[in-house]
């Protein structure tokens, strides 16, 4: 197994006839998936998603893949191929297209339908779109792409086999191997086997559940648990799930029909996506079940199908949990069903929401206390199956945090895969004469979207925001007379988020005055140096007396 290199050189020139693969996101996090394939001077992009921020990213709306390594090569991109319509695979598409709006976007019918409103929002009218289905082969520059049906927690997901003269790379996208899925569309293992028989040189596989033993529970196994929730609720039921989980919504609609309830969608993306899914025939709505208004029936006859299952602060469920939703006020006795997984990183936010809902008197049913959700990703057993069927010569685990990538690599090794590449974002994997190796790395960071600005906030800005939020803020203003070297006024100290009132600083003021006067008497007049003295004195005081490391803004002015 190739080990992670901490210090990698810049990538060497790509040898002629070789295939290069690198991810600009998705290796080391569950989110912002984006993989670049390079052959003969052309680039093919598979997926371009977003990562949702957590409490470490105050004020950030979205986190994008880092386009910098391909920014001067936008004209070489032959297409963006999308494996499926989840945000961690399509959310970044408009941001890449804003840099060149003529890149063709290729994906299944549902995937492209979910991308379309994003392109409209960003006023990207000219983007060429190409719909593909499983079994189809599409030539995109030097890349011959064959699309293979895979089963996942959204309909119409595809794996893609990319053939170039350098060999065949098979990218699973997100997948699992539910053998009795609700829509009957299983992962096409026959195609995997056929491709494997012909020879797969590089197999890129979904690592999300690689550390979960066994097999992912079939979707239909959760129907009884959902049914039980409906049977015992005698007030309003609120179900939260991903706004793209068509099959889960289908199960809720069916349960509602069975128990004589109406369903109203809550949350902009839920309303929009379910309309799309219904129009395209992926969602079958029982007659009369879906209503427009949340009060279309009495509470014990209503189900609200809502967004916000990951604790996203602005989504409908979080607002309900802190009683700030404009239309929905929870009543004691209401039932909230979280039909969703817990994406790594979202744990605190989700449990905060569950606590808020519980405090309001709701009964919260979630995957921790009932079988109301199954994952959309293959567990270890399924991955082992795939390695044995495909028999690839090189494996590159994708889609996961570091521990998931490692677990997945270990599974491949166990089945006898001779070469496993544990790459991170920016690492360059070159396939030369059938052998893949890590040859270098691009600098690859996080790109933050904050309101309408993209990439304007840096990691150090975020650190400032965290310090402000968690450790508080102190300002100190001192006015000096630079001719006499005397303090004219101050230090005047104000603090936020540290202590009840500013009088706690009274005891440190004489010390600041003394240190400043010492420096002034030694002839120091540089205000930056004087500010540094104020900062140090206040900083050690806050650390010692208040056990905090606040942001300190010293201002020394000359009279
Ligand atoms: Zn997915
Ligand atoms: Zn994904």
Image (cartoon, rainbow, N blue to C red):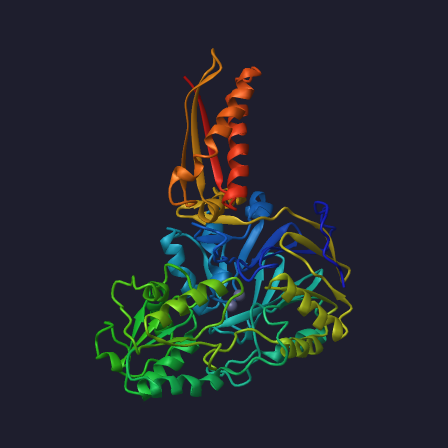
Which quadrant of the structure image shows residue 211? Answer: bottom right
Q: Foreground residue, 463 or 490?
A: 490
Relative height, residue 511 to residue 396 (above, below): above
Q: Foreground residue, 109 or 173?
A: 173
Q: What residue appears at the point 67 percent right and 74 percent down from the top-left corner?
A: 195
Position of residue 422 measured from the top left corner of the image (x, y, whole percent): 70, 61
Relative height, residue 97 to residue 420 (above, below): above
Position of residue 5 measured from the top left corner of the image (x, y, whole percent): 73, 53
Which quadrant of the structure image shows residue 478? Answer: top left
Position of residue 185 measured from the top left corner of the image (x, y, whole percent): 51, 80
Give the quarter of the figure containing the N terminus.
Answer: bottom right
Residue 528 visible in the shown view: no
Residue 509 visible in the shown view: yes
Give the quarter of the figure containing the C terminus.
Answer: top left
Q: Foreground residue, 136 or 54?
A: 54
Position of residue 369 measured from the top left corner of the image (x, y, whole percent): 47, 79
Q: What residue appears at the point 70 percent right and 67 percent down from the top-left corner?
A: 409
Which quadrant of the structure image shows residue 271? Answer: bottom left
Q: Position of 552 compared to 397: left or right?
A: left
Q: Position of 219 compared to 380: left or right?
A: left
Q: What residue appears at the point 43 percent right and 49 percent down from the top-left corner?
A: 59
């Amino acid at each position: 197994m190739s080990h992670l290199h901490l210090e990698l050189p810049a990538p060497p020139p790509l040898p002629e006839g070789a295939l290069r693969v690198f991810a600009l996101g998705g290796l080391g996090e569950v989110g912002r998936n984006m993989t670049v394939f390079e052959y003969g001077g052309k680039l093919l992009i598979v997926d371009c998603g977003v990562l949702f921020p957590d409490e470490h990213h105050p004020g950030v709306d979205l986190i994008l893949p880092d386009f910098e390594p391909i920014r001067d090569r936008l004209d070489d991109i032959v297409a963006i191929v999308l494996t499926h319509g989840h945000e961690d695979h399509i959310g970044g598409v408009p941001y890449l297209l804003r840099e060149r709006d003529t890149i063709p976007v290729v994906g299944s019918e549902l995937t492209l339908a979910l991308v379309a409103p994003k392109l409209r929002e960003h006023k990207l009218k000219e983007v060429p779109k190409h719909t593909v289905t499983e079994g189809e082969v599409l030539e995109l520059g030097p890349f011959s792409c064959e699309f293979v049906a895979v089963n996942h927690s959204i309909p119409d997901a595809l794996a893609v086999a990319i053939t170039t003269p350098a060999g065949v790379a098979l990218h699973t996208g997100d997948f699992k191997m539910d053998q009795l899925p609700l829509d009957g569309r299983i992962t096409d293992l026959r195609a995997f086997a056929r491709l494997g028989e012909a020879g797969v040189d590089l197999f890129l596989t979904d690592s999300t559940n690689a550390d979960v033993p066994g097999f992912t529970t079939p979707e239909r196994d959760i129907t009884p648990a959902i049914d039980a929730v409906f049977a015992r609720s005698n007030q309003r039921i609120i179900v939260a799930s991903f706004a793209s989980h068509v099959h889960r919504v289908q199960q809720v609609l069916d349960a509602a029909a069975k128990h004589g309830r109406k369903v109203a969608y809550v949350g902009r993306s839920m309303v929009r996506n379910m309309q799309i899914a219904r129009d395209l025939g992926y969602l079958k709505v029982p007659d009369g079940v879906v209503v427009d208004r949340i009060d279309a029936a009495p509470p014990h006859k209503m189900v609200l199908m809502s967004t916000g299952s990951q604790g996203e602060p602005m989504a409908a469920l979080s607002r309900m949990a802190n009683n700030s939703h404009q239309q929905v006020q929870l009543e004691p006795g209401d039932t909230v069903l979280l039909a969703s997984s817990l994406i790594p990183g979202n744990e605190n936010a989700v449990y905060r929401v569950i606590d808020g809902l519980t405090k309001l008197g709701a009964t919260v049913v979630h995957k921790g206390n009932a079988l109301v959700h199954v994952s959309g990703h293959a567990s270890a057993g399924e991955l082992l199956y795939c390695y044995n069927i495909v028999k690839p010569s090189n494996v590159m685990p994708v889609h996961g945090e570091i521990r998931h990538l490692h677990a997945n690599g270990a599974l491949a090794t166990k089945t006898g895969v001779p070469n496993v590449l544990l790459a991170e974002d920016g690492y360059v994997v070159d396939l030369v004469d059938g052998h893949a190796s890590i040859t270098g790395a691009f600098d690859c960071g996080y790109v933050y979207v904050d309101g309408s600005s993209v990439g304007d906030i840096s990691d150090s800005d975020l650190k400032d925001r965290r310090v402000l939020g968690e450790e508080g803020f102190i300002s100190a203003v001192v006015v000096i007379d630079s001719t006499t070297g005397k303090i004219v006024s101050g230090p005047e100290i104000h603090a936020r988020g540290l202590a009840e009132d500013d009088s706690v600083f009274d005891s440190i003021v004489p010390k600041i005055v003394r240190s400043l006067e010492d420096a002034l008497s030694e002839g120091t007049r540089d205000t930056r140096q004087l500010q540094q003295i104020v900062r140090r004195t206040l900083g050690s005081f806050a650390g010692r007396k208040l056990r905090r490391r606040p942001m300190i803004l010293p201002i020394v002015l000359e009279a």
